Structure formats: structure tokens, C-alpha cells
Amino acid sequence: MGKQKSGLLWQVQGAQLQQTSYVFGTMHVKNQSILSKLEQLENYILQTDAFAAEYHLDESMEAQNFSGAFQARSKEPLRYKLGEKKYQKYRKIIQNSVQLDLDHLASLRPLIIANLIEERMLPQEKGPVALDIHLWQFAKHHNKTLLGLETLKEQMQTLEGIDAQQEFAAFIGLCRNISAHHRQLHKMYNWYLSGNIRALYQATQKGLGKNRYTMLHKRNQIMSDRLLLILPEQSVFAAVGAAHLGGKNGLLAQLKRSGLKVTALPY
């Protein structure tokens, strides 16, 4: 389909669709420069029948056994796997950088710990909920049909399919180079603000290493297949992580290959 233009908000139309739908790239941040544009997004949500996120937020939060997928897969505690000296070194680095105590997180998978660290690195403001959660809550308040483009089972299969060695190595790399990781994350945040989905996709794919198929390409296929089933039935505002939009296997490319017209909207 060629290179996508920059943009986070996309209009989806087609002869096989009765109404216009929208795809929006989100980021889990609560920052005024992003939240100030909420009214525009809310107006598009009000024009549609349904709201779709990557997964059904309410169902995932209610699933009692889902949290088990966040727990460390190895029975060996993180501090013993690292060794006491390295564990304390990384604990201090994390505390100094993002004010998180590894002692309170050590039962979690390295991937989940890394996500919590990254969330702390991004510009956040107290008070409002993050952008993706706000949009879900807004749609719910206005009685929109709430959908997930992935099932809970598929989410858990994704977590189970991640290479454990690669996951642990990525966590070690984060701890060893936390300042560089911080700088890269802020680059990605600025790409997000400018709608540079191509750069976001490329950086995400590179960062995932051997897990890029499991966590990016396979999930793109699942979400696009499900979205293509929904679109002919009802209009939808689909909000997914912005890294899932770009690339030849991203949501936008797959929608275009299915014969739909996908157009960037000002945002």
C-alpha cells in the first residue's frame, strides 16, 4: 500500500460498509497535550454504534485468573535468578530512575515489570485517567456496544508465546541502559504526538526482537481479521496502540488490502 501518511486518526469507508468507521492509535498516557484533544475523538465515538479496544477492558479486569499470566513463569525468584549483587544494583537503578521498588515487583514477569517502568518514564499528570481508558469509559457512559479485537484467551496465548530468555534479556538490557531507554521512549512519545506511525512501528518492531511476530505481527492479524468482521455489521470507533497502525502488516495496510478506503483525518 506504500508508506502511510502520518496520522493517528483514520476514517474507514467502503462500498461494502453502510456507515463510516474510525481507527485511532492510542498511547497509555495522561498528559494535557493529548487530553486537550479529547472532544474531537469523543464526537467521532458518538457517531458510531460501537467502540472497540485491543481487548474488552471490563472482561479482562474481571477475569480472576488473568493476573496469573502476569506472574513470573520461573519458580526461581528474580533476586536469585539475577544474584543478590546484581539484584540490588538493578533495584537501586530502578528506584533512582522511576521510584519503583523491585522488592514489590519481583513476583511479576520481567515483561510486566518493564511495562511498569516505561509507564513511569512517560509524561504523566495526576488526576485524569490515561487516554485509552478515558475513551473506553466515555463510550461505555454513552451506551456504545463495547468490543475487544482480541479475546482474553488470545491475550493470554500471546503472553505464553513470548520467548522467556528474550524476555529476561530485554529486562536486563533495560536495567543496564535505563537512561538510553528513557531517551528512546521520549523519542517515541514525540513521534506519537506528531502522528509518526511509521517511526513508532519501526522502533517497536526493533525493540521486540525475537518476540516481534508474537507481540506485533500476529496480534495485528488477529485484530484486523476481527475488525473486518465487525465493520460490515456496524460502525465502530477502534482504538488500538499506535504501533499497530503502521507497517505492511499493520491494521491500516490490512484494511486497505481488503478493499476499504482508509483516509487520515486531522487530529
Image: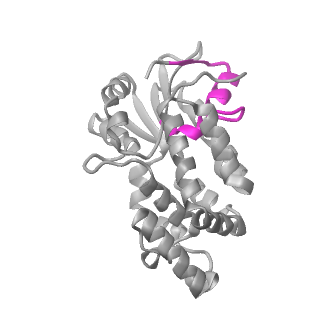
Task: Write down the region rendered in magenta.
Answer: 239-264
143 vs 78: above or below: above
- Quadrant of the rendering where the N terminus is positioned: top right
Q: Is residue 246 magenta?
A: yes
200 vs 114: above or below: above
- Where residue 175 sits, quadrant-wise, is bottom right
Tell me the residue at 48%/68% (across/down). 94
Q: Is residue 183 magenta?
A: no
Q: Position of residue 129 (x, y in %)?
A: 31, 47
Tell me the residue at 64%/41% (across/down). 220
Q: Position of residue 90 (x, y in %)?
A: 54, 74
Left/right of residue 247 with respect to residue 56 in the rendered view: right
The residue lying toward the viewer, choosing from 12 and 267, is: 267
96 vs 262: above or below: below
Q: Position of residue 168 (x, y in %)?
A: 65, 69
The residue lying toward the viewer, choosing from 212 and 22, is: 212
Residue 197 visible from this viewpoint: yes
Tell me the residue at 51%/59% (across/down). 115
Residue 214 visible from this viewpoint: no
Tell me the residue at 35%/34% (across/down). 33
The residue lying toward the viewer, choosing from 75 and 87, is: 87
Left/right of residue 169 with respect to residue 197 in the rendered view: right
